[in-house]
Structure formats: C-alpha cells, structure tokens
C-alpha cells in the first residue's frame, strides 16, 4: 500500500469537473484508490462519492493506493493531483 497527502489548490475544491476527471484517471488502474478527508473516505472511481466529501480549496486529503499496479497508480494519481487540483 502506498499513501500520500495533498493540499487542494483548485479555488473551487474537488467539484464536478475535476471529480469526473479524477474518476476517469483512477479507472485506468487495477489498484483500489481511496481519497480521505477528516475521517470520511471515497473510492476515487465513484464520482458522487468524491463530490460528497465536500473538499474545499486549502484542505488536505489523504490518498491510499493498494493493488497489483499500485506503483504506477501512485505515480499517475499523484501527477494528476499536482496538475489538476
């Protein structure tokens, strides 16, 4: 299992457009990718669950990746967060 923390930079937080893009990116990997904020978690492939976290700009999220391609998923998802969120 690999984990990292990220502070959201997008002024609108994780809203519909980036949540959709994140879910699409997460579906490229076999590994399970879970986003957590303040005790609540959501699978990265579930658009409505991501939006339900209510992540705002400046808030820190924890990303946990586990599975057969976790190294590739870790690199890809971390790069996605840095480029888009």
Image (tube, rainbow, N blue to C red):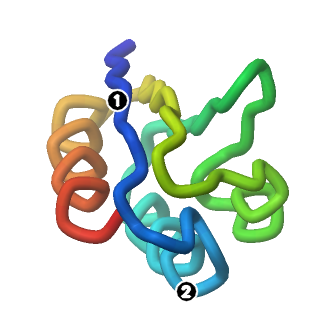
The secondary structure type at the circle numbered 2 is: helix
* Left or right: residue 47 compared with residue 3: right
Secondary structure beneath disc 1? Answer: loop
Disc nearest the viewer among 2 and 1: 2
Q: Nearer the viewer, residue 62 or 2?
A: 62
Residue 62 at what x, y percent from top left?
Answer: 49, 27
Q: Position of residue 74 (x, y in %)?
A: 25, 37
Residue labelled with disc 2: 17
Q: Quadrant of residue 67?
A: top left
Q: Is residue 26 left or right of residue 20?
A: left
User: Residue 7's spot in the image, x, y percent?
Assistant: 38, 39
Left or right position of 69 against 72 = right
Q: Which residue lies at the image location 46% right of the left edge and 70% below the top edge?
A: 11
Q: Name which of mark 2 and mark 1 comes first in the sequence.
A: 2
Which residue is identified by label 1? 68
Residue found at the very far top of the displayed protein? 1
Q: Residues within 10 Å of mark 2 (few under 14, many from 20)?
A: few
Which residue corresponds to the image point at 46% horizontal and 31% vertical from the top-left? Answer: 63
């Amino acid at each position: 299992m690999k984990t990292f923390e990220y502070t959201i930079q997008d002024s609108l937080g994780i809203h519909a457009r980036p949540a959709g893009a994140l879910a699409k990116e997460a579906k490229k990997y076999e590994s399970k990718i879970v986003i957590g904020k303040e005790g609540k978690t959501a699978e990265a492939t579930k658009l409505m669950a991501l939006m339900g976290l209510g992540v705002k700009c400046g808030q820190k999220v924890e990303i946990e990746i586990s599975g057969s391609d976790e190294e590739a998923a870790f690199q890809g998802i971390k790069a996605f967060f840095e480029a888009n969120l």
